[in-house]
Amino acid sequence: MTGEGSGRTRTDRTALDPPAWFRQQAVVSDPDIYETFADEWPDCWRRAGELLDWDDFPETVFRGGETPPFEWFPGGTLNASVNCVDRHLPERKNQRALVWEGHLGDSRSYTYLELHREVNAAAAALRELGVEAGDVVTLYLPMVPELPVTMLACARLGAIHNVVFAGFSADALAERMARSTSAYLVTCDGYYRRGDAIAQKNKADNARLALDHDVEVVVLDHLGQGVHLGPGYHDYGELIDAHRGDEVEPVSRAASDPLFQIYTSGTTGEPRGVTHTTGGYLAHVAWTARSVLDIRPEDTHWCSADIGWITGHSYIVYGPLALGTTTMLYGGTADHPEKDRLWELVDRHAVDVFYTAPTAIRAFMKWGAEYPDRHDLSSLRLLGSVGEPIDEPTWRWYHEHIGGGECPVVDTWWQTETGAILVSTLPGVDAMKPGAAGKPLPGIDAAVVDGRGEPVEPDESGELAITRPWPGMPRALATGTDWGAHDGGPWRYYPEDGARQDADGYITFLGRIDEAVNVAGRRFSTMELESTIVGVAGVAEAAVVGADHDTTGTAIYAYVAPERDAAESDLRGRIRAAVEDAIGGVATPEEIVFTPDLPKTRSGKVMRRLLRAVANDETLGDTSALRNPEILGEIRSRTRDR
């Protein structure tokens, strides 16, 4: 959030209309859809429910009053595995469902019929081990096809999957299994990351030893070197082979029954478990995949996230497969073996929709446009951004160099707790404003409010509040056991994101409330500071944190990754001038530390917690989620040298 006395920040960005060719063929192109959904709420969400196949159709769309409990699609029963696989067989059994590209150039694909067979075999194998409806099965796998297969196998049985990001440590895995009381674990021997073999089973073994309950472990021999299995361990391949040809009757689940648990990353504190429901969640992700990402069955869709995060759950697995499209998984990194790896794959597979994170886009910018220029990207129809706010220079580079200046870009806002997209433009309806995410989607009510919960004026900074329930809300929020705020007043959900909304209703996100930097009593949004710094010619990436200061309480430290050949001495002065001009002298960074890279998770998110620790010369703590831990020593050395 901007600070006291800083005034309004101009948001009169130049709006770009979607191209006529896109609007004409867009899945959603009705400009009255916002008004229609507002007039018909909550029955408007029937459209989302109608995208699914139900065993028992819901009695109504929504049941609830002004405060929890809320229930979406009450009386409805369904199975998520059937919706993602079985129902597509009559029309597209020979169409590719999953395309997997591995780290070392290996690849596999599965038609919907082949995926159906794999899911049934995996479900039969889990059932043999004792898995039943309601059991929690933890999946600790890298980006391999067996991960979505096992997720869908759990859904078929009515079991609850608990995917833990493969890069997390043994302690993090054990903590998540203990919190979920999970007695089943599916993992692998290891996997490759930038050419190095990661011993995944060793971490799983240590986690199992740390638990105070018995665990049945299934191990995939991914590296193909053979795996030693002791008591309580089972070979994934042998289990699947023993059940090939089996068909498992799908377990019908109530719409409000849990589909999966997932834990927030834990990079900024204690992991928090989130449980999403079968009916509301699946309807919401299917509707947003169709309406926002414009996905249709004939597409090849690539979301570059890791399935270990909610983005991968929603927009690699459940959303695309519910719509019967082809979804891609990639088990490698963007710069291995070369920095054009992603564009080579877009070219090879004629990808239609590409959905990635701003941090990744900024890395592409730093590497240079020559890498995407090597390949034919003309198959792309739509680009998406997810995970954090995207600043205007990064948006424009993405639009021009990846989208050829023609593809609409949807800047989507949502989080683990929301399950699916809540704020974005509809690409066949809305103009795009680079740097602003868009309006709350049809059927979503949101406001930017001040500390008293009152709506602020247009272009004033405040905190985002979601003021009505939505189908993909987590169970704890729907039941009223956690997170929702009403205290006798109107019900609201506060995602803890700073934001401002312009007169057209477009929301610009300013970063997490807890990431604001308070300098001499004034609060500044890290996103606003970072966007200003990235807008300076010669800057590729930037991250801003607060460090302790004797006089002002907190000082602003800016960690900056320059573009190639940028002169640091000149850049430092231009960064200070840009911040002073855009925000004010009090927001000028106390220290500007240049670094070749920023500490990032394997999904590309910058771990500001670690930068704060470096700036304050504190212990780093858990770094297991980092993809580049070696950069921390370099950053600490450069910080101390300042």
Image (spheres, grey):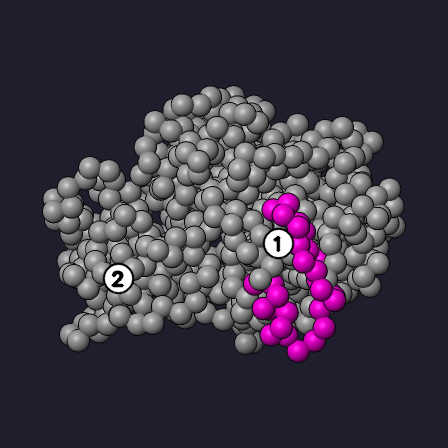
Residue 376 placement, left or right of 368:
right
Q: Residue at x 58, y 35 (%)?
A: 106
Give the number of the disc on residue 536: none
Q: Is residue 522 left or right of residue 188?
A: left
Query: Is 267 covered by the magenta stretch?
Result: no
Residue 1 percent location from the top left of the image = 33, 60
Query: Could you tell me residue 295's position as x and y percent?
Result: 61, 34
In the rendering, at what x and y percent does residue 91 appear? 79, 29
SS type, badge 1: loop
The answer to whether residue 230 is magenta is yes
**Which residue type carries mark 1?**
Asp
Q: Where is 379 relative to 176, above or below?
A: above
- Tell which tag, 1 or 2, sits nearer the viewer: 1
Q: Which mark is residue 189?
A: 1
The structure residue drawn at horizontal position 81% and vertical position 61%, both measured from the top left corner, is: 129
Q: CA distance from mark 1 to mark 2?
A: 34 Å
Quick one: 345 or 498, which is closer to the camera?
345
Number of marks present in the image shown: 2
Residue 352: image quadrant is: top right
Disc 1 or 2, which lies upstream in sequence? 1
Q: Which residue is mark 2?
A: 636
Answer few, some or many: residues within 10 Å of disc 1's Cα (few below 14, many 20 plus, some between 14 and 19): many
- Using the image as rendered, state which of residue 334 and residue 190 is in the foreground: 190
Quick one: quadrant of the C terminus? Answer: bottom left
Q: Are marks 1 and 2 in contact (CB under 8 Å)?
A: no
Q: Secondary structure at mark 2?
A: helix
Residue 4 coordinates in the image, percent (x, y): 25, 65
Q: Amino acid at mark 2?
A: Arg
Q: Which residues are magenta?
A: 203-232
